[in-house]
Image (cartoon, grey):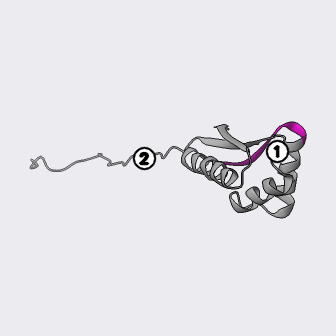
Amino acid sequence: MGGTGREREGSVVTEKKQQTKRPSMYKVLLHNDDYTTMDFVVMVLQTIFHKSVEEANQIMLNVHERGVGVAGVYPRDVAETKVILVHDLARKNEYPLKCSFEKA
């Protein structure tokens, strides 16, 4: 029997799932200086990075003892925003606290 040509024997329709790529992550770093107080660094870590008192104190000690401490790891746009917030808050309080970010 002749067909109309519309039968599709053995054909399978498959959909490719689009893979979403995870964004690159960046470490936000706080740098030690001789003027910014430890209390101010702890406050920055609690308010901007939402760290507990214990976490904030540990990171602050890393900054103090090692010269740098990781405040958090975020996607690039969040990391950039955190750096700006730290610099603005430090400037308003007349501290030279330096903050930067680098690829994790």
Give the Cα separation between the discs numbered 2 and 1.
51 Å
Prevalent SS, magenta region: strand
Amino acid at dot 2: Gln
Residue 101: quarter of image? top right
Quadrant of residue 53 within the rendered picture: bottom right
Q: Earlier in the sequence, mark 2 or mark 1?
A: 2
Instruction: Give the amino acid type for the residue marked by disc 1 in the picture.
Output: Tyr
Left-right relation of 37 to 99: right
* Residue 15 in the image, given as x and y percentages of width and height: 37, 49
Q: In screen coordinates, is 30 left or right of 53?
A: left
Front residue of 58 and 39: 39
Q: Which residues are magenta?
A: 65-73
Picture coordinates of residue 78 (x, y %)? 58, 50
* Percent x, y of residue 50: 72, 61
Observer-nearest of 45 and 23: 45
Which residue corresponds to the image point at 32% horizontal and 49% vertical from the top-left? 13
Point 48% across, 47% down: residue = 20
Given this view, does label 2 or label 1 mark the residue nearer the observer?
Answer: 1
User: In the image, which disc is placed on residue 35?
Assistant: 1
Does the segment drawn in magenta span residue 78? no
Give the structural element (helix, strand or loop) at label 1: loop
Disc 2 designates what residue? 18
